[in-house]
Amino acid sequence: MVMVMPSWTIHIKIGKEILKKIKMDKDLFLFGSLIPDTDYDWKLKRFSAHYYGKLKFPICPYENMIDLQTFKKDYEEVLNNDMIKGYYTHLLIDNFYNEYIYKNKWVQKNNVVVGVKTIKGEIINVSDNYRLTGDYKHKDLELYGKRIFLKEDLVLPDDTSKIKKSIKLLKDGFIKEENVDKRIKYLHGDFIDNFVKVKEEEKELDYLLFTKEELDNLMNKCIEYVYKELLSLIK
């Protein structure tokens, strides 16, 4: 299985747009929106934090599907907390992008992904290196996310004290207070320097799998999808 996830820049951008539509605590919501991408010293690994493992995508049976219903069941008593809403938002975004990519970019044979479609309609054979299915996608989405923040301000969580109070709500307590401090420091430091700034060699790069218009439409539709799903929680 390849975990087909949008970049943090895309998660942050979508989170920023959702905050314009729904009044929530910025620090809790944005920190929550990055929770499933666990760090090496957290008590839970990414696979489990994303609620993978039980469901398979009907259109791509070899691939795992995020189990949104189990997440909501596990957190049904605290779904009103803005950090938990952020966590749920991350899963919604990943699920949305996964489904689109599985339908439109992967080439399957016997329910196994064997190729990737490029913008030009060419097929890149990945049957001998399955991990490349995710690598090609990640490069496009990371570059797209970086280019977003060339045009607008980056919004990040800041207040660790509020976040530390809310991490107690997480199942199995898989984030410690020191993890919060490390991630906030990383977001305001190395993350900006290494993963948000467009490097000189990236300025002229073209996308391989998506068109710019396709990526814009995908994000706008995802924002509306997440907005509706969160509204259903509030009601």
Image: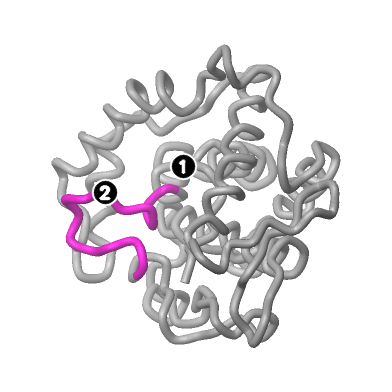
How far from the left and from the top, in percent, is residue 125?
64, 61
Q: Which residue is mark 2?
A: 39
Q: Residue at x 20, y 70 (%)?
A: 172
For the stretch drawn in magenta, the main secondary structure is loop
Count residues near mark 1 (Cα–Cα under 10 Å), then give few for <14, some for 14-19, many for 20+.
many
In the picture of the structure, the residue carrying the numbered disc 1 is: 30
Say if residue 147 shows up in the picture: yes
Badge 1 marks a residue whose secondary structure is: helix
Q: Is residue 25 left or right of residue 179?
A: right
Q: Is mark 1 in CB contact (under 8 Å) with mark 2?
A: no
Which three-letter amino acid code belongs to the residue tagged 1? Answer: Leu
Name the residue located 30 percent from the left edge and 44 percent from the top edge: 163
Residue 128 drawn above or below residue 227: below
So how many labels did they put on this image? 2
How far is disc 1 from disc 2 in space, using C-alphas? Answer: 16 Å
Q: Quadrant of residue 46?
A: bottom left
Q: Earlier in the sequence, mark 1 or mark 2?
A: 1
Res 231 visible:
no
Q: Position of residue 25 (x, y in %)?
A: 47, 41
Residue 54 percent coordinates (x, y)? 44, 86
What range is drawn magenta here? 34-47
Dot 2, how many residues are within 10 Å of its Cα: few (below 14), some (14-19), or many (20+)? some
